[in-house]
Amino acid sequence: MSADRATSFGAEAANYEAGRPEYPFDAVAWMLERMPADSRRIVDVGAGTGKLTRVLSHAPGAEVVAVDPDPAMLAALRQNVPGVPTFQGTAEQMPLPDASIDAAVLGQTWHWVEPITASAELGRVVRSGGVLGLIWNIRDESTAWVRRLTDVMHSSPAENMVNGPESEGPRIAAPFGEVETQRWEWNRPMTRTQLHQMALSRSYLITAPADERAEITRQMDALFDELGLDGESTIDLPYVTHAFRAVRG
């Protein structure tokens, strides 16, 4: 997997914030419900522009910090979720002390990490009994036009890990225990502009040559013309949110 793709998102932080969906509150709450009763310290790892951080910060009494390798994404996060402390780092190299966190969560991120190293490092910062939560919003390709859209944009590492034909889900290792999983189906109304912003926030397009980006945009426009999507009209983009959780031993 390309390190350039994994760290490319800061170049398109504005499109990432506008084009990517929020996380359903119920799914985030489910990830965290195995935390010990006195828990409040949560780290959002690979936090990006703060999509997941925003939901976490609304939890009563939560003390949330955000970690991301990209300074441009952290700058966007500080604007989007003011007051949340931010640190530069990765799941494999956390800038936090031992046993200082009650839960570590990663949104759209685990497919970029080395799972054995990341599990061990997150196990270092999460206290015994704490939780590791992973979550992805994946487009529901049981809908024909969504399959066509993915064919144009190309599938992502996230989609292949969580929803691929031979996917066994994310690998979580010691010191975390058994992995539990749930899924939620929902729709996000999107305009033509938002769909283009979503595409432009994907690592494949960010790192693609200019002529390939232009061809993908052209093919997307042809699909949207077919669907009659223009101006401020919207179309429901179906999503499946996949969440996973494991308790630290």
Image: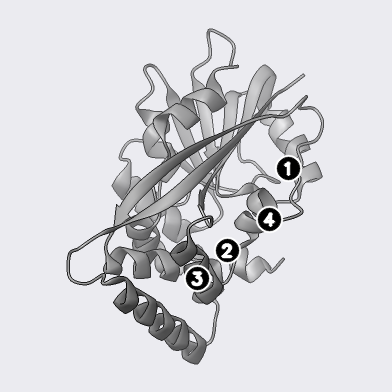
Q: How far apart, in angstroms, are the residues tagged by discs 1 and 2?
A: 16 Å
Q: CA distance from mark 3 to mark 2?
A: 27 Å
Label 1 sits on residue: 118
- The mark nearer the N terminus, 4 or 1, is 1
Q: Quadrant of residue 26?
A: top left
Q: Which residue is mark 3?
A: 148
At x 33% / y 41%, what residue is drawn? 81
Q: Taking the image as drawn, is residue 201 in sight? A: no
Q: Disc 1 on helix, strand or loop?
A: helix
Q: Are marks 3 and 4 in contact (CB under 8 Å)?
A: no
Q: Amino acid at mark 4?
A: Gly
Residue 168, percent across and down? 76, 45
- Residue 13 visible in rendering: yes
Residue 7 badge: 2
Q: Looking at the image, which residue is at 31% across and 46% down?
A: 80
100 left or right of 215 in image: right
Quick one: 212 or 139, which is closer to the camera?
139
